[in-house]
Image (spheres, rainbow, N blue to C red):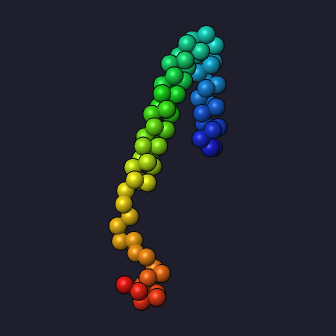
Amino acid sequence: MGFGMELLFILMLALVVLGPKRLQAMLGPVARAKAELDAATCGIRSQFGADLDAMPREGKTDASHELAGDQ
């Protein structure tokens, strides 16, 4: 059973136990929290990528000068 099937089973079980109105009321805050988490994750990823791009590359050499023997 994959993760998607397990999630579907849990949602169907919650629908039977709670009913459609209570399930909808409970899933609203969960959906908002997930959206906030996704936005925060996107911000962290973009900041991390920008920081990596801004870092100087240590140990990087110019191979053309080494191969030609130029100093």
- 12 shown above or below 47: above
Q: Is residue 38 above or below residue 56?
A: above
Q: Which of 50 and 1 lies nearest the eye of the viewer? A: 50
Name the quadrant of the N terminus.
top right
Question: Residue 14: horizontal and vertical position, in percent?
Answer: 58, 21
Q: Residue at x 58, y 16 (%)?
A: 23
Q: Which residue is located at x 48 percent, y 27 percent?
A: 36
Asked if 34 appears above or below 18 in the picture, the reply is below
57 and 31: which is toward the camera: 57
Q: Quadrant of residue 7?
A: top right
Residue 71 sits above or below residue 42 on the image: below
| Residue 63 position in % (x across, y down) | 46, 79
Residue located farthest toward the top when viewing the structure as drawn: 21
Looking at the picture, tell me which residue is in the foreground, 47 or 3: 47
Q: Quadrant of residue 22?
A: top right
Residue at 55% x, 19% y: name it.
27
Q: Position of residue 24 (x, y in %)?
A: 59, 15
Which residue lies most toward the bottom here? Answer: 69
User: Is residue 18 visible to the viewer in this orientation of the structure?
Assistant: no
**Residue name at image x 44 percent, y 82 percent:** 65
The C terminus, quarter of image: bottom left
